[in-house]
Amino acid sequence: MRISIDREGCIGSGQCTLTAPALFGQDDMGIVYVLPEGAEGTSDPSVREAEQACPVQAITVAED
């Protein structure tokens, strides 16, 4: 599973960091990034919940 973030589309709502704090972080501007634990792909089901929770669909999860 590969996680990608549209950093230009991210509005910093933080729903992904609340849903999957082990996979996502936010920079000083509130823009989301994938933590090293999620960068190599993950089988954590919370990643799909975070994808759905994003109000602007800035998270994309794709199967490898």
Image (spheres, helix red, strand yellow):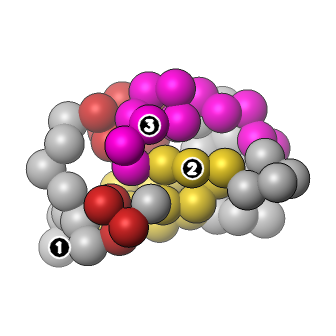
Q: How far apart are marks 3 and 2 (CA)?
A: 7 Å
Q: Are marks 3 and 2 in contact (CB under 8 Å)?
A: no
Q: Name the residue under label 2.
A: 25
Q: Nearer the viewer, mark 1 or mark 3?
A: 3
- Residue behind mark 1: 64
Q: What residue type is labelled 1?
A: Asp
Camera-nearest residue between 48 and 17: 17
Residue 49 in view in this figure: yes
Classed neighbour count for the residue bearing mark 3: other residues with Cα under 10 Å, few (<14), some (14–19), many (≥20): some
Distance CA(mark 1)–CA(mark 3):
22 Å
Helix, strand or loop for disc 2 = strand
The amino acid marked with disc number 3 is Pro
User: Which percent across, then down, holds residue 25?
Assistant: 57, 50
Q: Give the camera-side residue of 33 and 11.
A: 33
| Range covered by the magenta-colored residues | 11-23
Viewer-proximal residue, 64 or 37?
37
Q: Whole-percent x and y of residue 8?
A: 78, 64
Say which quarter of the image contains residue 14: top right
SS class, disc 3:
loop
Query: Residue at coordinates 44% horizontally, 37% vertically from top-left?
Result: 21
Query: How far across and down, in percent of the image, does residue 62 sit?
Result: 29, 62
- SS of the residue under disc 1: loop
Q: Name the residue under label 3.
A: 21
